[in-house]
Amino acid sequence: MKVLELRAMRGPNYWSVRRHKLIVMTLDLEDLEEKPTNVIPGFLERLEKMFPTMYEHRCSEGCPGGFFMRVKEGTWMGHVIEHIALEIQSLAGMEVGFGRTRDYGQKGVYFVVFDYLEERVGLYAAKAAIAIAEALIAGKEYDLQDDIQEMRELRESSRLGPSTASIIDEAVSRNIPWIRLNKYSLCQLGYGANQKRIQAAVTSNTSSIALELACDKEDTKFLLEQAEVPVPKGDIVRTEVGLKEAVERIGYPLVVKPVDGNHGRGITANIKDWDTAVLAFAAAKDVSKTIIVEKYITGEDYRLLVINYKLVAAALRKPAHVIGDGKSTIQQLIDEVNKDPRRGYGHEKMLTMISIDAMTEKILTKKELTLESVIPAGERLDLKDTANLSTGGTASDVTDIVHPYNIFMAERIARIIGLDICGIDVMTSDISIPVTETGGAVLEVNAGPGLRMHLDPTDGLARNVAAPIIDMLFPHGSDARIPIVAVSGTNGKTTTTRLMAHMAKMKGFKVGYTTTDGVYIQNRMLMKGDCTGPQSAEFVLKDPTVNFAVLECARGGILRAGLGFKQCDIGIVTNVTADHLGLKGIHTLEQLAKVKGVVPEVVKKDGYAILNADDDLVYAMRKNVQANVALFSLDENNPRIKALQKLGGITAVYENGFITVCRGTWKMRIIRAVDVPLTFGGKAVFMIQNILPVVISGYVQGFGIEDIKVSLETFIPSPAQTPGRLNMFNFENFDLLLDYAHNPPGLRALQKMIERMDGSPKVGIIAGVGDRRVEDNNNIGKIAAEMFDEIIVRQDKNLRGKSEDELIAMLVDGIKSVDPNKKITIIPSENEAIRFAVKTLSKVH
């Protein structure tokens, strides 16, 4: 078997507009195409033995054991690999279940499609599934546990942390879009000018001064002392001599911690002798040059979480520990605790497994214990110095019993430091009693506090602490989104996109848009090239200056990774005609229409899918749309237009020489087509088809009729506004028209315009396209033969898999099939071809 292509979908896609996270593998079965599973001796038995839990895979049979039934009857190896990829991810703790295996359109080649939760894991699962299938076919041993552990480690290294993930989940539940900005936890909530950013529990609202203060324990303690907040007695030291002086002044027990530390790094608590103090000092020095030495306050360790200066949760924290039973060793006790189904690897579950690390060994050595020691029944042995959940600690929710004074104190501390989100560590015997009465103290104020202990406590009520963070970032009435107009289709996408962007700009919006030419932010090109894929869309949506996005969405980007957004306000499909067929498994117009149809399917329910009523395949897309549908047509009497008008729907038509928008049967004439520069005095009728959906888009966005009219009047086809699209250059003796028409339907539309233009002879410079079918290039030649008196054949620099001679031959064959005597000149260089044409025409006049 051979993997021909392996891609990860990250947005709405050809396979599913609802399931965005899919792996799409193009797999060549090679000789296994002739060997379904029922002719491979012992294959089913080996599969059942390796994956007994796969019995739950129902497959098309719709019942438990359904997939095994298919294997017994005989199915192809691509189908098996799909199920193996799903199952091994589930065994690694990532439950997934959606999969499809479909014919690619080439003998023995299949699309194998399946769910993933973490992209790197999904890609790994694809390759591992093939290796497993090959081992099962050959009857070889295979160590599945290695793959499962590798996938767990990949997940932990790439997934969002629990704090960030909880905020993202809350945002998604409110239909707030998000983008991951780096491989860590920096994420964007919302789009464009309305965005906010988070990194764990630090937000774009968080004060940099407050953040700096919280990371400087010396300054934090000083401010709290000045505000009469109870804090432990302590000193700041930098040398061992200073440590000695602090020990003598404060007395044991002590806590030693770095000034610049966070998340428990470098902290040693309950120090009772000089040797331990020296070791603790060295550990803290690894984190910070300056060290805090404080009196160790006895009591319970509480974390108070304050968001937007209101206490939202409180937890009693305990470090990883075991309770003796008088007979089991410490190692056995740890193993027993780790059997708790709530404990898992890293952050995969509510609790983390307890591991034996240097901190644990130091504690055991200090107590003169080993992992083989047996501790008395009922005795608690702490295995870590800090109560972090990430090291195996536990947390119990105590929010409802926090004394009002302690709530007042916590909220006041947040104001003193200036943190919008902070975790306050308090040591006290009972949080239901004022700290001032128990002799407790505030130990630390943490920026970016972990939320996991409150979201999923070991005991007590779980608190949705992500909700107040989203409330703070996006207060009631604020909008996280910006208007998005997405444009798809075969021909006219770029012109439609540019005209829509121009119209929005004329209304005062700061527009970002993507095209086949590049990405533009406020009419400035910031990326050059074909930028119609998801990365380019995200580029616009990440820009904090943009408050209106117009995104051209081409076939290639949708097939490569899906759309770069989950929803849009308006989705336009211009047309569907034969282009790029035979590429990426798309062989028919119906399949191509399904690709383009992804755009209208992701329009919000209160948005508009704007469809071409003159195109059967585009009109049919309305069946899968959840949004409002608006239609446009070059024929006002189109029955589809009339039917929607009777229902009170919105349409745009070309009637009596006018570009007109209609609500129901009421007409609102915008402008005469001949007065729109883009139509070249009405000669370029196909351009009207690009104008009509833009007129609807402006209308449903609330733009006035006069505003729409002015936009159409001021959009001039030129190298600046429409590069490569109907650019007319007028010389003394001839005119030169430059257009991007690159497929037969596009060239046919251009032909109708050329026929309405005066001048003779008409000389055409054409080129073939290497990744198109032979018949497509033949047809370009045929249409060119009808359009032009003379033809010059040139070539692109990128031949896309064909040779120069092959492409020239395809075009010439098409030309000669129409007119064997047509004058043809072959000049491969584009520049030379243009010079030759200009020179020839100059001589004519």
Image (tube, rainbow, N blue to C red):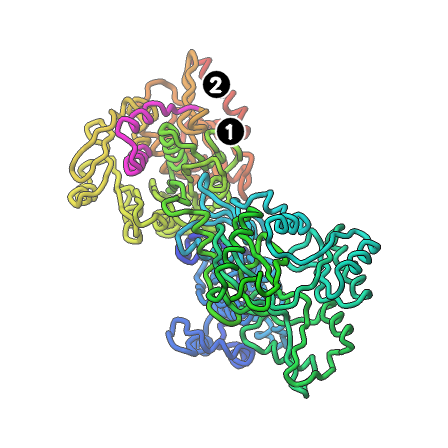
Magenta span dominant secondary structure: helix
Q: Amino acid at mark 2?
A: Val
- Label 1: state its secondary structure: strand
Q: CA distance from mark 2 to mark 1?
A: 15 Å
User: For the point 34% across and 42% down, which residue is it?
Assistant: 570
State whether residue 556 appears in this view. Answer: yes
Picture quadrant of residue 435: bottom right
**Quadrant of the snapshot with the C terminus:** top left
Quick one: label 1, few (<14), some, or many (20+) residues within 10 Å?
some
As drawn, 546 above or below 678: below
Q: Position of residue 751 (x, y in %)?
A: 34, 30
- Label 2: state its secondary structure: helix
Picture quadrant of residue 434: bottom right
As drawn, 488 above or below 692: below
Residue 528 within the segment the image draws in magenta:
no
**Quadrant of the snapshot with the N terminus:** bottom right
User: For the point 47% across and 43% down, which residue is it?
Assistant: 195
User: For the point 77% across and 72% down, which residue is it?
Assistant: 366
* Residue linked to disc 2: 838
State whether residue 558 appears in this view. Answer: no
Depth check, front residue: 654 or 607 = 607
Quick one: label 2, few (<14), some, or many (20+) residues within 10 Å?
some
Depth check, front residue: 754 or 67 = 67
As drawn, 286 above or below 483: below
Q: Position of residue 746 (x, y in %)?
A: 37, 35
Viewer-nearest of discs 2 and 1: 2
Single out the residue that lies furthest toward the right: 241
Q: Magenta segment, which residues?
A: 690-718
* Residue linked to disc 1: 826
